[in-house]
Amino acid sequence: MHLLRWSFTLLTFIGLLSPSEWKFSWKRVLYSVYTIVVLLLLFSFEIFLFLDLVINVDNQDDFSENLYVTLVFFSSCCKSLMLLIYRGDIELLLDALLEEPFVPVNTEEDKIRVKFEEQIE
């Protein structure tokens, strides 16, 4: 699907959304291993940030800075986990957007679709 092409390319590159054309092949298995490695790195870094927050805080300024970074990173961990959990539903939604009720019927609708795709990118 060419809708939101750059967003899905980025998600594919960082290991969160596998290409839909890879069905039950060795590429899919390697990509799953890559996804697990990326998530392990992400969550281990979050654990180290939390330990830094607990162990190495000397004053309120350090605590507030470390807490802010830890919470931001925790939210990105949660977002990536939710994206992985609902990856199948996202693929179904993208496939549904290419089917009959959502496909442009005439040239006017196609021009509108192209206009908004250009604005997004």
Image: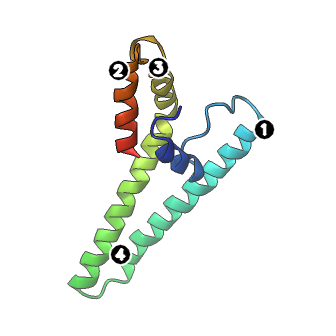
Query: In the rendered structure, are the residues bearing label 2 and label 4 in contact, judged by CB atoms less than 8 Å apart?
Result: no
Q: Which element is circle 4 on? A: helix
The kind of residue on which mark 3 rests is Ala
Per the image, the residue denoted by label 3 is 96
Neighbourhood count class around disc 1 (C-alpha, 10 Å): few under 14, some 14–19, many 20 upward:
few
- x and y percent of residue 52 in the render? 40, 77
Q: Which residue is mark 2?
A: 108
Q: Residues within 10 Å of mark 4 (few under 14, many from 20)?
A: few
Indicate the position of residue 92 as horizontal and vertical percent values: 49, 24
Q: Which residue is mark 4?
A: 54
Question: Of callouts 2 and 4, which one flags the residue occurring earlier in the amino acid sequence?
Answer: 4
Tell me the amino acid under the disc marked 1. Answer: Trp
Q: Residue at x 43, y 18 (%)?
A: 103
Relative to residue 101, is residue 68 depicted above or below? below
8 vs 48: above or below: above
Mark 4 vs mark 1, CA separation in Å: 42 Å
Q: Secondary structure at mark 1?
A: helix
Seen as rendered, the residue at the extreme left is 60
User: Mark 4 and mark 3 in contact (Cβ < 8 Å)?
Assistant: no
Gap in angstroms between the C-alphas marked 3 and 2? 21 Å
**What is the x, y in percent for residue 54?**
35, 75
Residue at the (51%, 35%) spot, across then down: 2
Q: Nearer the viewer, mark 2 or mark 4?
A: 2
Q: Are marks 3 and 2 in contact (CB under 8 Å)?
A: no
Residue type for callout 4: Val
Mark 3 surroundings: few (<14), some (14-19) or many (≥20) residues within 10 A:
few
Which amino acid is tagged 2? Glu
| Separation of residues labelled 2 and 4 (CA atoms) | 59 Å
Return the residue at label 1. Answer: 26
Q: Secondary structure at mark 3?
A: helix
State which tag comes first along the sequence, 3 or 1. Answer: 1
Residue at the outermost right position: 26
